[in-house]
Image: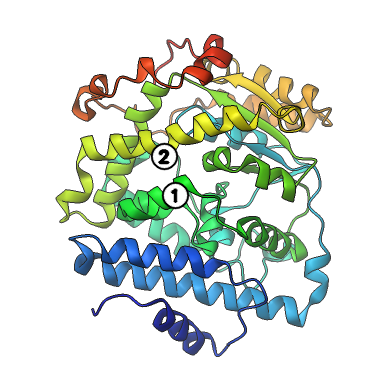
Amino acid sequence: MPPLDAKALMQDACRATGLTDWGADRSFEVGLARLIDAVEAMPLAASLREAVAGQATALLATRLQLEADAKAHPEILEGEIRRPLIVVGLPRTGTTWLFDLLALDPGARAPLTWEVGAPSPAPELATFATDPRIAPTQAGIDAMLAAVPELATMHPFGAAMPAECNAILQLHFASSNFWATYHVPDYIDWLTEVRPEGVMNTHRRVLQQLQWKGPRGRWTLKSPPYLLMLEDLLAAYPDACLVQTHREPAKMVASLANMIRALRRARFPELVALQDPKAIARSVLAHFGEALERSVVSRQDPRVDERFLDIAYRDVVADPLGSVRRIYQHFDLPWSAVFEDRLTAHIGLGRSTGHGKHVYDPSEFEIDALGLADQFLQYRERFGDLLEDEAAA
């Protein structure tokens, strides 16, 4: 393929959809340009162009479709997002397990993988469990797990499982998912350093789309990179209920680096350079280390800090039911017998994905050489009592 070009990709999306209206907010173009520049700056650019072009064109087509839906049905934009419950802890700190448990509440509404991947046409309540988008989404997941089976030990995957907001933010081209897939160091540096404009506009628009005809309920969400943009998150949802999970950062870095290496191997098995464990660990530390430190600074503002409840990873693992109950009591959310029964049944199945334990060797990622015990001093000073943790990864 020739070098990637943002204007050409947007034209491709217009041709594919027959649509041309991008809407008033075109701030997504900044992230698109940054992603393309980052890909083209890589020695492996030629090997990545086809995959990046395909994904970017599909995302752009979805943006066009969302704009067309809103023009045809302006009532979509009247939908309100009230008191969303959002898990914002770092990856590998129990966030997925906690998110899945919170999503079991019959009064909750979590975005699912299949609908986030293709939010237009809007999902409908009557066909929500049988939507034709579910099967191809699951087929793609099955193919990924067949290519790299150990991924199933690291994270639960499923078309009908709750999806974190990173997938939504891909539509704004402001998501760490691109880094996890393609490496793109220049892009993740940009995403770490700045707070891209308009991100929450795209996020709100997708939630409005999904709740328009689909199931209703209090939005229950999750995204670790929100720690980089807490002020923007609360500007969009000032009544949000935020839960931050805490775990020793050294364990997070090694576990996440191993998972990212496996994800890249599933997509690009021939590109060994994308799977260098030491480089991945350093990149994980740079991005999420900044998220950790920035969140501490943001939470020095009482108006931000009052929206939070902090929970230790060890408690999420040792007493998941008690952790969920604590969250509901803290935010004064309604508790039901049906919810408790669902929690008890789900917890009884165990945290394992059913495919074995996530096994990795921290020394392979040279974690000791990163000097993590001497980093994040502000974070450790405030939350150090929550970091002591003997639980398995």
Q: Is residue 52 above or below residue 250?
A: below
- Quadrant for the C terminus, please: top left
- Quadrant for the N terminus, please: bottom left
388 relative position to 131: left or right: left
State the image coordinates of residue 19 (x, y, percent, origin top left).
Answer: 58, 87
- Residue at image position (73%, 22%) is 325
- Residue at image position (48%, 53%) is 175
- Residue at image position (53%, 39%) is 224
The three-letter amino acid code for the residue at tag 2 is His
- Count of picture labels: 2
Label 1 crowding class (10 Å Cα cut-off): few <14, some 14-19, many 20+? Answer: many
State the image coordinates of residue 82 (x, y, percent, origin top left).
Answer: 81, 47
Work out whether residue 51 or residue 3 is closer to the camera in this orientation and state it.
3
Q: Quadrant of residue 155?
A: top left
Q: Secondary structure at mark 2?
A: helix
Disc 2 marks which residue? Answer: 287
Camera-nearest label, 2 or 1? 2
Q: Name the colouring of the figure.
A: rainbow
State if disc 1 and disc 2 touch (CB < 8 Å): yes
Q: Is residue 346 above or below residue 206?
A: above
Q: Is residue 218 above or below residue 184?
A: above
State the image coordinates of residue 294 (x, y, percent, origin top left).
Answer: 54, 33
Work out whether residue 335 or residue 207 is closer to the camera in this orientation and state it.
207
Q: Secondary structure at mark 1?
A: helix
Label 2 crowding class (10 Å Cα cut-off): few <14, some 14-19, many 20+? Answer: some
State the image coordinates of residue 144 (x, y, percent, origin top left).
Answer: 33, 53
Earlier residue among tags 2 and 1:
1
Disc 1 marks which residue? Answer: 176
The three-letter amino acid code for the residue at tag 1 is Ser
Q: Quadrant of residue 330?
A: top right
CA–CA distance in space, label 2 to label 1: 9 Å
